[in-house]
Amino acid sequence: MIHPTALVSAEAQIDPSAEIGAYVIIEGPVQIGAGCRIAPHAQIVGDTVIGEGTAIGRAAVIGEFPQDIGFTPAIQSGVRIGRNNVIREHVTIHRGSKEGGLTEVGDGNFIMVGAHLGHDVKLGSKNIIANAALIAGHVHLGNNTFLGGGAVFHQFLRIGDYCVVQGNSSFSKDIPHYCSAGRTNLITGMNIIGLRRQGFSSDDRKHIKELFDLIYRSGRNLKQAVAEARTRTWPDHAEKFLQFFEAPSKKGVGTLRMRSEADDE
């Protein structure tokens, strides 16, 4: 199952059921699980572990040094990729930047052509990352979120679960769970369609909307809105939404886009 033109390190551990294509380079103590498919010209290097059933596209590069001017090759760090991911052509996923640091990808993600995951990114499961989306170092992204093509994300921010982000947008602030977002650091509303498709009940959506309106539309600042919200008990999904605002990153949270007459044209 290993093409004769592939260059495979003696340190690598490759399950016998994995397929390794032509001119693939596997360098260092790479581990590749059962049923993985590595397409021609892909490069997988360093302390990289790829879970079973994951497909790596042509010319993807996984586990290369981080783009961090403070990094030295003596630092031992790696990449951990879960099961049943689809990682398409020319995707780059860099290893952690600090000693023992890891860039981590969960299960069942679909990462499209030319996307980039920087060092120390923590990516959950069942996300879709469209072509040429760029995720900088230390970004934490949840589960079941869609990032549009060409969207860019600054380092250290957080992106929640069940979000949808417009293509070609730019973010240096957090995007809370269940939100739609776009342009530059703008929250454009709740991801209502996505929540319906994911089976959120009408009660769940109602409670999340109550919190959304309290935080974004009540005229209170964030601290005041959270304090007001804490005067009552919330169901699980709404509670998760509220907790996001209680522990934002140092970047802060995206602001609500207010409707204008141009939006109605």
Image (tube, rainbow, N blue to C red):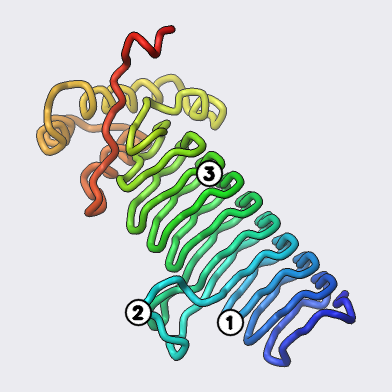
User: Residue 199 location, x and y as percent?
Assistant: 53, 29
Does dot 2 land on a helix, a strand or a loop? loop
Q: Residue at x 67, y 84 (%)?
A: 27
- The quarter of the picture where residue 75 lies is bottom left
Amino acid at pointer 2: Gly
Task: Describe residue 38's horizontal placement relative to residue 222 as left or right.
Answer: right
Q: Earlier in the sequence, mark 1 or mark 2?
A: 1
Q: Residue at x 40, y 80 (%)?
A: 71
Measuring from the top left, give residue 232's x and y in whole percent.
Answer: 18, 30
Q: Residues within 10 Å of mark 1 (few under 14, many from 20)?
A: many
Q: Residue at x 41, y 75 (%)?
A: 97
Q: Which residue is mark 1?
A: 46
Regarding mark 1 in the picture, which secondary structure is present there?
A: loop
Cα distance between the residues tagged 1 and 3: 28 Å
Residue receiving disc 2: 70
Real-space Cα separation, disc 3 to disc 2, in angstroms: 27 Å
Quarter holding residue 210: top left
Secondary structure under tag 3 reads loop
Image point (56%, 81%), residue name: 47
- According to the picture, the residue beneath numbered tag 3 turns out to be 150
Q: CA distance from mark 1 to mark 2?
A: 18 Å
Give, as a three-letter code, the residue at label 1: Gly
Q: Earlier in the sequence, mark 3 or mark 2?
A: 2
Q: Indicate which label's residue lies in the foreground, 1 or 3.
A: 3
Whichever of labels 1 and 3 marks the residue nearer the N terminus, that label is 1
Q: How far across and how far down the image is residue 235, in percent?
A: 33, 32
Quarter of the image with the N terminus is bottom right
**Amino acid on which the number 3 mark rests in the picture:** Gly
